[in-house]
Amino acid sequence: MSNFHSLFRPILFAAAYQLRGIGKIAPFYFLLSTWTTSSRVYNRTAGRPVPEGYARAILPGVVIAYAVPTVLMFLPYSSIDTWQDAIALWQFAPLAVGPLVFALGRALAVPDPDELEMYKNRDVAPLRAAYALGVGVTGVVHVCVVLFALAQGVRLGRIFGVENPFSGKWPSDGNPLEEIFQFFKWDLASWALVTLVWCLWSVFDMRRLGYVTTGQALRAAVAVPASLLALGPGAMYAGTWYWREGVISELCK
């Protein structure tokens, strides 16, 4: 794992999507990822392993740097100033994930690994644990948001329509809440669409490389959009990589 990939690229993209929105930045991220992973060396099963220290650092790094500030932002504070401070802290959370994972990875690195270390698949368990937790947490959040919207009488088909699904609950002309809603609506829609395309491309790439059969690829291609509807884009993304990691690690035995 190079210093650029483990540290600088996450910081650059996190800063970009905090400023411009993830829906606008995600296409560039996936295009760059497609280009950087197109080499034949990367596509070999021997090129799959992540250094064990970094694999073990991903889960605690994401929880400490991103999940904790996110939870703090939604706690019921008695003071609005405290709540605003929590929101301000969260703005820097995506920027902190890369440096923290990099630092933890260096601290947890295996000293003097032998020549066969990369074939032992010791990184698979912590990587898949991180993906599984990502599926679980983002899936639960997605389901809770959907159920909350239904409980509030909001028809899901209207959320991404032209009409404001919350019409009547606030004035629409020049109201900042309306502008915020429109921004997040289309930002989420754009991100979900490009993530869906990326996940389907990952399935196709696994079949192109011969790592899965046509039947396996077709089942995965059906599961990807199904997971988007049932569990949301975050769970779809993490779930796709959970599946991909498992397939390739089996080939490395």
Image: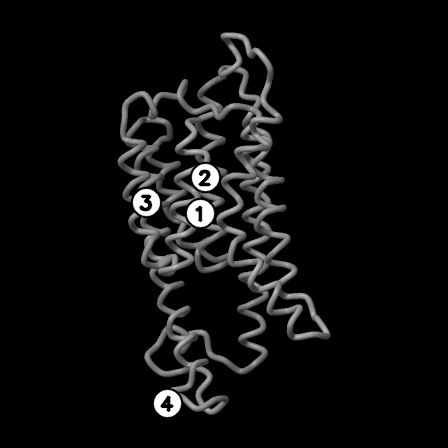
Tell me the mark number nearer the camera, choosing from 4 and 3.
4
Tell me the mark number nearer the camera, choosing from 1 and 4.
4
Q: Nearer the viewer, residue 96 or 123?
A: 96
Q: Residue 203: horizontal and vertical position, in percent? A: 35, 39
Which one is earlier in the sequence, the residue at label 4 or at label 3? 3
Which one is earlier in the sequence, the residue at label 1 or at label 3? 3
| Residue underneath mark 3 | 30
Q: From what the image shows, is residue 5 above or below residue 227?
A: above
Q: Which of 40 and 216 is in front in this view?
A: 40
Which one is earlier in the sequence, the residue at label 3 or at label 2? 3
Q: Residue 64: horizontal and vertical position, in percent? A: 63, 46
Q: Which amino acid does label 1 sit on?
A: Tyr
- Report, in whole angstroms, how far the alpha carbon at label 1 lies from the one at label 4: 36 Å
Tell me the mark number nearer the camera, choosing from 1 and 3.
3
Residue ID at (35%, 59%): 23
| Residue underneath mark 1 | 237
| Residue underneath mark 4 | 173
- Report, in whole angstroms, how far the alpha carbon at label 1 lies from the one at label 3: 12 Å
Q: Residue 152: horizontal and vertical position, in percent? A: 56, 81
Tell me the mark number nearer the camera, choosing from 3 and 2.
3
Asked which secondary structure carries label 2, the reply is helix
| Residue underneath mark 2 | 241
Where does the N terminus fall, quadrant-wise? top left
- Report, in whole angstroms, how far the alpha carbon at label 4 lies from the one at label 2: 43 Å
Q: Which amino acid does label 2 sit on?
A: Trp
- The quarter of the picture where residue 160 lies is bottom left
Tell me the mark number nearer the camera, choosing from 4 and 2.
4
